[in-house]
Amino acid sequence: MVMLLTAVMIGGVLVTFALIVIRLSDRTPTLPDQIELPDGAKAQAVTIGNNWYAVVTDDSRILIFDKTTGRLRQEIPVE
């Protein structure tokens, strides 16, 4: 009886681990090969959303780009 319970628990852990790996493996973010930043700003950090990505620049701005077109959607100054 104990062996059966142990085998079921090990199987459950393996199935759970496999499902987590499968679920997370297809969520690889995609970015364009090159991002054009205005006025020679340099990127400090990048955040990716569903249909946008944001770049935090070294001159205290957040630039939000459209993921499909690469067009600058919004610029937010950071104080």
Image (cartoon, rainbow, N blue to C red):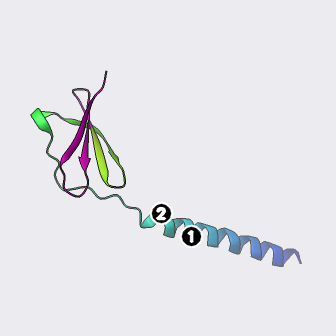
**Residue at horizontal 30%, vertical 25%?**
78
Residue 31's label in the rendered image is none
**Where is 57 relative to 26, above or below?**
above
Residue drawn at x 15%, y 40% as measured from the top left: 37
Instruction: Report x, y in % for residue 64.
Output: 26, 42
Q: Residue furthest top?
A: 79
Q: Is residue 11 above or below residue 27?
A: below
The amino acid marked with disc number 1 is Leu
Quadrant showing the C terminus: top left
The range drawn in magenta is: 56-79
Q: Position of residue 62 (x, y in %)?
A: 27, 34
Element assignment for label 2? helix
Quarter placement of the N terminus: bottom right
User: Quick check: marks 2 and 1 in contact, CB under 8 Å?
Assistant: no
Residue in view at x 82 percent, y 78 percent = 4
Instruction: Tell me where residue 32 sits by quadrant.
Output: bottom left
Q: Is residue 8 above or below residue 31?
A: below
- Answer left or right for 16 relative to 5: left
Asked if residue 37 lies in the magenta stretch, the reply is no
- Going by the numbered disc 2, the residue's amino acid type is Leu
Q: Which one is nearer the viewer's eye here, 15 or 49?
A: 49
Which residue is outermost to the left?
39
The residue carrying pointer 2 sits among few (fewer than 14), some (14 to 19) or many (20 or more) residues within 10 Å by Cα, namely: few
Observer-nearest residue: 68 or 36? 68
Q: Position of residue 63 (x, y in %)?
A: 24, 38
Which residue lies under the disc numbered 1? 19
Q: Which mark is residue 24?
A: 2
